Amino acid sequence: MKVAVLGAGVVGVATAWELLRDGHEVVVLDRRPEPASETSYANAGMIAPGHAYAWSSPAALKTLIRALFRDDLALRFRFQGSLDFWRWALRFALQCTAEKAARNTMRKVSLALYSQRRLAEVLAETGIACGMRSRGALYLYRRAAGLAAADEKAKILRDAGVEVRRVSPEEAAALDPVYEPVKDRFAGALYAPGDESGDARLFTRELARRCAAEGAVLRLGETVRDFRTAGDRVESAITDRGEVAADAFVLALGCYSAPIGKKLGLELPIWPVKGYSITLPVGGSNNPPQLPGVDEDNLFAFANFGDRVRLTAIAELDGWDWSHRPEDFAPMLKAAHELFPQAGDWSRAEYWAGLRPMTPNNLPIIGRGRHRNLWVNSGHGHMGWTWACGTARITADLLAGRRPEWDPSGLEPKAH
């Protein structure tokens, strides 16, 4: 069967790989000239079942309300005139109950654990080297009360099968010596030994090369504009360079799945949530963190890819704006300098902003669309790198008519 995968981010390329493994003829389309040029380009890099809490929660709703009047929070809000945004925001708010947050977290964690196993299998199959670190992650707390509350909250992760344990500053410094000089600045940490990190962009581009070597056609720099349909089937994708006919189509365009999906009668509640990142080259005299993690009081994440360190922060509801200004990074820079003054070469920092494809319940959209040969694998939010290989395998199984190992029931796309 010929399958057209729309999107060459980490999710789309991982899906192409799984389809190739199943013996399909695959073509991948993306508007960018290289794979992983949008959300997968400079993300946090963490594969983190130990931090897979639902963003839609009572605490997030309180923060959003505060963000209406403040611009110095990790969660930022910009007023928008889009009716689609306000529909999404209402749905998000309705998910912000303790009961729904717990349910969504349990499902997020379950999918993360399944996907992490599948990622390990893909890395073993391909031999791709992408700066993977597999010695766990540290989630730091500056205050004892915050650490105690986080330890209690982590019970939901433990119940889902994730090992998370509380460690003292001395134990954190033993796990990662970078904290030895600053261990008096925090009360302790939660340590998740199973969490990992790696460069999603490098993984995606290397996997795309493997796909091409296995016969996949990568049509990059080509934008999908519309579709030609006949009855309950999609016949072809219409691009700015012509038409691409296929027997089946997979929609994996991240944030752009929502507007493109409308052309196929789908209502995909996906909205862009902007994040910011800083990438530092590491030289011989630098002292970067060895383990990935999060400074929970300042809400910035960090990961070491070997020759580079990635710092990420902020969840900003600002529509489709990819731009960034120096002041956007100031809080992250200040907190990172305090914690990791020798993390890398600050004079050669690379600054970036990208859009996370977020759904109101923070779970991806996986399943068949209105047309019987259309499948959706999108809406991964901040978990794209963590979930990519798992949802790719699930999508390939569904397309083949097999029962997936992980049950995606309830995540199917909805029609208009």
Image (cartoon, rainbow, N blue to C red):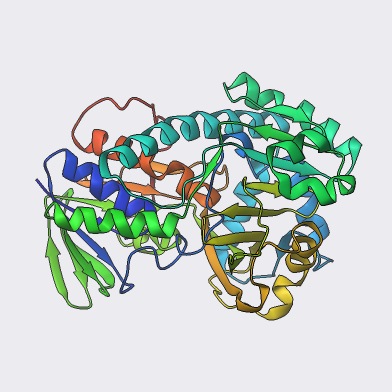
On the picture, is 263 further left or further right than 385? Answer: left
| In the foreground, 302 or 21 | 302
Query: Is 157 located above or below residue 207 in the figure?
Result: above
Q: Residue 331, located in which quarter of the rendered image?
A: bottom right
Residue 210: image x %, image y %? 22, 53
On the picture, is 414 further left or further right than 149? Answer: left
In the picture, the quarter occupied by the N terminus is top left
Q: How many marks?
A: 0
Residue 77: image x %, image y %? 71, 64
Q: Residue at x 68, y 58 (%)?
A: 287
Residue 53 visible, this angle: no
| In the foreground, 10 or 334 | 334
Query: Is 363 located above or below residue 151 in the figure?
Result: below
On the picture, is 251 further left or further right than 256? Answer: left
Residue 63 visible, this angle: yes
| In the foreground, 226 or 242 | 242
Q: Residue 401, located in which quarter of the rendered image?
A: top left
Q: Residue at x 79, y 52 (%)?
A: 63
Q: Residue at x 36, y 41 (%)?
A: 389
On the picture, is 109 further left or further right than 257? Answer: right
Residue 350: image x %, image y %? 57, 74
| In the foreground, 63 or 94 | 63
Instruction: Point out the residue furthest to the front here.
Output: 284
Residue 278: image x %, image y %? 61, 67
